[in-house]
Amino acid sequence: DAGVIQSPRHEVTEMGQEVTLRCKPISGHDYLFWYRQTMMRGLELLIYFNNNVPIDDSGMPEDRFSAKMPNASFSNLKIQPSEPRDSAVYFCASSSGTGIQPQHFGDGTRLSIL
Amino acid sequence: GQQLNQSPQSMFIQEGEDVSMNCTSSSIFNTWLWYKQDPGEGPVLLIALYKAGELTSNGRLTAQFGITRKDSFLNISASIPSDVGIYFCAGFTGFQKLVFGTGTRLLVSP
């Protein structure tokens, strides 16, 4: 079975550029989560969706960050304009919402803003 | 906010040794999860604990959900080199949100 698929795996771009990270959740999962991982702050939840609807975006650091889920098989996270402090590994995870179900993670996008 | 503290922060052991790591919180969690993260990859679920006092095994791994629902431990028996990685505990706060611990980095010497 295909797991959560993220692209790109690595992204290096200059400060001020728009960055788009993509995620394809596991088929049939109705929850999708975006996390950011840094050495200083560990794994932080940015936003999550249920049935394509954003439920909680309280972890989104600034207005420069936005996320959408246009359909059940795709989500993207955008940063515009990007800043060096946005450099981190961004993970997408998905889960089935029946009861408390563990989240399954993609392999992440390593983002470096120069 | 809710925090999960893991100890130790890192461990360096010899292959074949047993390993024990802990996770504690000031808040009660309904469900505890243990994940392992290999370099360059996302966290992978190892064990899920749903009831206070529950003891669950997965091969050489054993985890327990504390009676107070504020702590959990993970044991690895007879460690092998592929056990190397970062181990995270995580707790559900409800509404499908997970809070992750600070992680325990495990190094295993052959």
Image: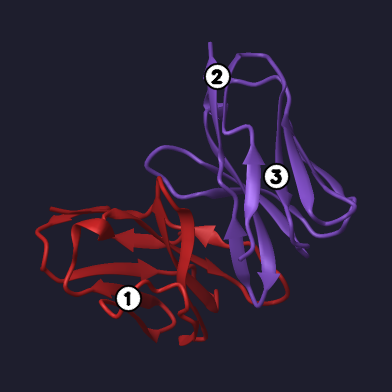
> Do pointers 3 and 2 mark residues of a single chain?
yes
Mark in the foreground, 2 or 1: 1
Q: Please name the residue that numbered disc 2 is placed on.
A: B108
Where residue B99 appears, x then y in whole percent?
Answer: 60, 61
Q: What is the crowding at mark 3: few (fewer than 14 residues within 10 Å), some, or many (at least 20)? A: many
Q: Amino acid at mark 1?
A: Glu
Q: Find numbered disc 2 in the image and state the secondary structure of the residue it sits on.
A: strand
- For mark 1, name the chain: A
A55 on left or right of A86 = right
Q: Which chain is purple?
A: B
Tell me which label, 3 or 2, sits earlier in the chain: 3
User: In the image shown, does A85 or A18 lie closer to the viewer?
Assistant: A85
Mark 1 and mark 3 in contact? Answer it, CB < 8 Å.
no
Q: Which chain is red?
A: A
Q: Amino acid at mark 2?
A: Val
Q: Please name the residue that numbered disc 1 is placed on.
A: A62
